[in-house]
């Protein structure tokens, strides 16, 4: 790296990253576009921004989510490439972190992505993009990365060493089961036949519950050193408050706790790993079902001459979340046998303690903007029709 290249990047950053004006951004991009030798140093600085985000509690999926929310697809591709380039320089990470990196690699689809090249690490413009446009996108991304606030650190739980008895012994068995659950839910959401969707969803819920119960029984037989973990799940606009309520209901029913960060568009869910996986799967499935039901109900309302689409949707999703919460809570109360109560109680204490340590100061909020009676009625009815499954009774 030449001192000239470093000076070019310093000048571009000093001009563009600490000012919000378009003129400053254009000036910085012009400096970078005029000096191809600065590309490698520009990429190195980007990897430093990514590493700094990790030090402030962010994870790969968090960064990609905020970039997608605030910027455009080109910035998402750049961020993904920088994260992948930084990965070899990181220390050992847990399986959830690695899964996020694997998802980024799968989405990139191999070569051809904008971002650091494999040979030099330089930030290069993709084919058909001029250097000025590309440099502008890079600086816009770096501006965002520079301003990311600190988040709670979500250390992953310690996993058991050596083989464990029972159906959850080893990551391979877990991965196969979760892959099967995801496939069943995807088919249930895609089919146009209600009977088939119900059968597929019921089977997925049975496997999901079995997965969680096996973990609890294993802990009852041989208490493990594992502690509750945590993950962040995106809660995106529009109607994010109702979606956060739905996620909270799903988390509570699966022995987890959810804390919503409204400004950054996600909830942090705290719980044991098997339960976190169940929450992610069930929440995603219920959102897909809710969207399909809402679209159908809204079309019928509009066909009848109604035009208040926004208030209808807000009320629909609020009612859906409220009713799903009631159904899940009722199911949770009837599916646990007395012999499992002690281990579940100790787990819930551990989850509560971990949540309190992560979030010592939280507030509650009320649902806003629920004013459409038809939307509320339709949403509640859709929740009654939704496939949520139940935890089977233990033998």
Image (cartoon, grey):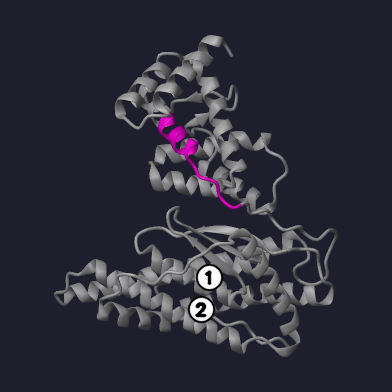
Residue 341 in sight: yes
Q: As rendered, which of 118 and 232 lies closer to the eye?
A: 232
The part of the image, by quadrant, that contains residue 270 is bottom right
Q: Residues within 10 Å of mark 1 (few under 14, many from 20)?
A: many
Earlier sequence position, callout 2 versus callout 1: 1
**Extent of the magenta region:** 138-152
Q: Residues within 10 Å of mark 2 (few under 14, many from 20)?
A: many
**Horizontal and vertical percent for residue 119?**
60, 23
Answer with left or right where residue 66 lies relative to residue 299. Answer: right
For the C terminus, the quadrant is bottom right
Q: Is residue 56 magenta?
A: no
Answer with left or right where residue 72 lies relative to residue 39. Answer: left
Q: Residue at x 39, y 45 (%)?
A: 70
Q: Residue at x 59, y 47 (%)?
A: 57
Tell me, for residue 274, which label it has, or none.
none
Residue receiving disc 2 = 388
**Horizontal and vertical percent for residue 289?**
42, 71
Q: Residue at x 52, y 49 (%)?
A: 62
Kind of element beneath mark 1: helix
Residue receiving disc 1 = 282
For the N terminus, the quadrant is top right
Q: Residue at x 50, y 31 (%)?
A: 115
Is mark 2 in CB contact (under 8 Å) with mark 1?
Answer: yes
Secondary structure predominantly adopted by residues drawn in magenta: helix
Q: CA distance from mark 2 to mark 1?
A: 8 Å
**Horizontal and vertical percent for residue 16?**
40, 26
Is 233 located above or below residue 297 in the figure? above
**Horizontal and vertical percent for residue 307?**
17, 69
């Amino acid at each position: 790296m030449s001192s000239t290249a470093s000076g070019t990047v310093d000048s571009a950053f000093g001009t563009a990253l600490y000012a919000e004006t378009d003129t400053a951004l254009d000036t910085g991009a012009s400096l970078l576009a005029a000096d191809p030798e600065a590309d490698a140093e520009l990429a190195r600085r980007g990897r430093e921004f990514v590493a700094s985000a990790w030090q402030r509690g962010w994870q790969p999926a968090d960064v990609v989510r905020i970039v997608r929310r605030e910027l455009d697809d080109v910035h998402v591709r750049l961020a993904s490439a920088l994260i992948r380039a930084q990965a070899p320089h990181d220390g050992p990470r847990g399986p959830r972190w690695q899964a996020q990196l694997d998802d980024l690699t799968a989405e990139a689809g191999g070569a051809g992505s904008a971002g650091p090249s494999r040979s030099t690490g330089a930030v290069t413009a993709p084919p058909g993009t001029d250097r000025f446009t590309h440099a502008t996108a890079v600086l816009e991304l770096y501006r965002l990365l520079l301003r990311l606030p600190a988040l709670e650190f979500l250390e992953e739980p310690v996993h058991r060493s050596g083989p464990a008895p029972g159906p959850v012994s080893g990551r391979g068995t877990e991965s196969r089961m979760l892959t099967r659950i995801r496939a069943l839910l995807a088919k249930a959401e895609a089919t146009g036949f209600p009977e088939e969707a119900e059968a597929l969803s019921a089977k997925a819920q049975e496997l999901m519950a079995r997965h969680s119960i096996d973990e609890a029984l294993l802990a009852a037989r041989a208490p493990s050193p594992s502690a509750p973990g945590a993950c962040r799940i995106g809660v995106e606009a529009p109607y994010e408050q109702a979606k956060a309520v739905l996620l909270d209901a799903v988390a509570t029913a699966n022995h987890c706790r959810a804390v919503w960060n409204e400004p950054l568009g996600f909830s942090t869910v705290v719980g044991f790993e098997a339960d976190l996986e169940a929450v992610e799967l069930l929440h995603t499935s219920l959102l897909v079902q809710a969207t399909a039901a809402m679209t159908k109900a809204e079309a019928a309302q509009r066909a009848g001459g109604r035009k208040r689409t926004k208030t209808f949707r807000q009320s629909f999703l609020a009612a859906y979340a409220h009713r799903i919460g009631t159904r899940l809570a009722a199911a949770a109360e009837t599916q646990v046998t007395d012999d499992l109560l002690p281990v579940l109680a100790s787990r819930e204490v551990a989850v509560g303690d971990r949540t309190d340590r992560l979030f010592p100061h939280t507030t509650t909020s009320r649902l806003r903007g629920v004013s459409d009676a038809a939307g509320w009625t339709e949403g509640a009815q859709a929740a009654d029709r939704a496939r949520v499954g139940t935890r089977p009774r233990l033998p």
